[in-house]
Image (cartoon, rainbow, N blue to C red):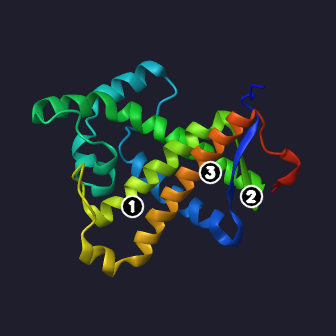
Amino acid sequence: MTLGDDQLVWAFDGRDGRDGGLRAMLGFYLEHLSALLPPPSDDPFEQIVADLADDPTNRMLADPRLARLYPPATDQEQDADEFWRGSIHDQTRIRIAAAEKVTAALDEWVGFVPVSLSEVDDWARTLGALRLFWYAELAGTERLAEPVAAVVRDNPGLHDLIEWLGYLLEDLLEMRGACLSAGQGLDPEQFDRA
């Protein structure tokens, strides 16, 4: 049996304030991402012109958390700058849209927050980005940098947060795989709307 996009394949455990914690992290993350975009316009042509006139590269590089989310596509500085200039706006809008969907889901449910097959990519994109976003505090912005032992020792809560986000991401993907293999989603009757 094939699962439909609306079949539930995972649930985020938002009990005991975890929903509020994730919501707060998402707000902070969205605030940082929004700083990379020019003011929005309802006119598509004006938005294109604003995007072309705006170079968010320096704003991104000035924020270690954001720099971690946008690694250079090449070792050549000029090519990396061109890549960033041409892609940061689009990537940022995709990240914002995904995070807003996760935030909306947190607002819609009490306790466990069900995630349908069609929502998995948004949750995975957002949880993975949050993990990288906070990982920059422990390891810096270099692409393959490892956490600094002294920083980890001084910030055990941050280390635990990064581990928790990694656990959520792994659990999400494993549950999706299990549901796809079994051809059966989770029972929607077990979840309570806000």
Q: Quadrant of residue 131?
A: bottom left
Q: Residue at x 42, y 26 (%)?
A: 47
Q: Nearer the viewer, residue 174 or 74?
A: 174
Q: Which residue is mark 1?
A: 134
**Identity, as a three-letter code, of the amino acid under mark 3:** Thr
* Dot placed on the residue nearer the N-terminal end, 1 or 2: 2
Q: Tell me residue 148's x, y (percent).
A: 24, 69
102 over 5 or under it: above or below: below
| Quadrant (top left/top right/bottom left/bottom right) for the C terminus | bottom right
As drawn, the residue found furthest toward the bottom would be 154
- Label 3: state its secondary structure: helix
Up-down relation of residue 103 to residue 37 (above or below) = below
Residue 123 screen position, x and y as percent: 57, 45
Q: Nearer the viewer, mark 3 or mark 2?
A: 2
| Residue 35 visible in this rendered orientation of the protein | yes
Q: Secondary structure at mark 2?
A: strand
Could you say whether the residue bearing mark 1 is in a helix, strand or loop? helix
Q: Would you name the residue on which mark 3 appears?
A: 103
Residue 162 quadrant: bottom left
- Give the Cα separation between the discs numbered 1 and 2: 24 Å
State the CA–CA distance, disc 3 to disc 2: 14 Å
Residue identifier under label 2: 112
Residue at position x 74%, y 29% in the image: 3
